Image: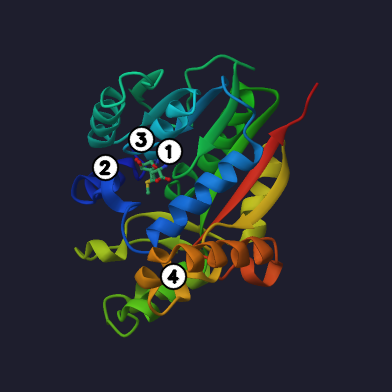
Amino acid sequence: MNSDDSLPEIVRYYCDADEAKRLCTGWFRLEHARTQELILRYLPPAPATIIDAGGGAGIYACWLATRGYQVHLIDPVPKHVEQARAASAQQAEHPLASVQMGDARHLLHGDNSVDAVLLLGPLYHLVDRGDRLACLREARRVARPGGLVWGAGISHFASLFDSLAHGFFADASFVPILDRDLEEGQHRNPTSNPVYFTDAFLHRPGELYRDFVAAGIDVLELVVIEGPGWLAADFDRLWNDPVQRERLLAVIRKVEREPSVLGASSHIMAIGRKKAQ
Ligand SMILES: C[S@@+](CC[C@H](N)C(=O)[O-])C[C@H]1O[C@@H](n2cnc3c(N)ncnc32)[C@H](O)[C@@H]1O
């Protein structure tokens, strides 16, 4: 873990943000449902061993444990590690295999030892490409031949869409943040407004793809997570109607690989496989 990097800022940000509840609110529910769908699409049957690196409060890790997987969660935020331990204790029959403070750039597992690695956070929080490649190379190292890696990115254009949709596009303090996002993909929030998030790198779809390839991981899919679902005018009403919810998910599936739609999603997902030797 580098002491001179953005981890202290990330830890500070998540002290106030509530990751344990986020995925149950508003259109984060779409992110949650689609992420689960994209994980299940490729995951081998249980039992298999998964590392959830940047697993936050344990939402995906605990869900996978209830499905019979051996899940090891690491996260650099002490609050998240505590929350994940508490969530694991709540499901005594399906606890997490381990929950530890850790950094996706330095995994403690041995070479070729796990079936799958989830990187649903580190690849957008690490602002330096060398660090993102270090994460992916570590995922490749610990994955068995043929093992799988999921990597989530925030879209290069996400803060533009978010600011337009949520009314802070014109905020003078947001203008330089957005300008830098669009020029460099380097998101920084020097204000004290938590709505403007924290240090992050915003990927163009091709950048996430190339990071996987540079780390020696074959890309099986590069898809949208939410796609254009965030545009829904009355998302809660739509999501709470089971028929419309399924329709939305079916439409997103139809457009999920479309290159012109990839950048219009808040998040994108690369799913890769380590070559079988
Ligand atoms: C928005 S949360 C996502 C949590 C969960 N994976 C999800 O998808 O809902 C991003 C997570 O990435 C973690 N993270 C940031 N940098 C990391 C790093 N270098 N190694 C591991 N985790 C990291 C953060 O602590 C945080 O828990």
Q: Which mark is residue 58?
A: 3
Is the C-beta of the residue carrying label 1 under 8 Å from the nearest atom of ligand 1?
A: yes
Residue 163 vertical position relative to residue 156 in the rendered view, above or below: below
Q: Earlier in the sequence, mark 2 or mark 3?
A: 2
**SS for tag 1?**
helix
Is the C-beta of the residue carrying label 2 under 8 Å from the nearest atom of ligand 1?
A: yes
Asked whether residue 28 appears in the rendered view, the answer is yes
Mark 1 Cα-neighbour bin, 10 Å: few <14, some 14–19, many ≥20: some
Amino acid carrying label 1: it is Tyr
Name the mark nearer the viewer: 2 or 3.
Answer: 3
Amino acid carrying label 2: it is Val
For marks 2 and 3, give the CA distance. Answer: 16 Å
For marks 1 and 3, give the CA distance. Answer: 6 Å
Residue 261 vertical position relative to residue 147 in the rendered view, above or below: below
Q: Which mark is residue 11?
A: 2
- 53 displayed left or right of 207: left
- The N terminus appears in which quarter of the rendering? top left
For marks 4 and 2, give the CA distance. Answer: 23 Å
Residue 117 position within the rendered picture, expressed as x and y whole percent measured from the top left? 55, 31
Q: Which residue is mark 4?
A: 180
Q: Which residue is mark 1?
A: 60
Amino acid carrying label 4: it is Arg
For marks 2 and 1, give the CA distance. Answer: 20 Å
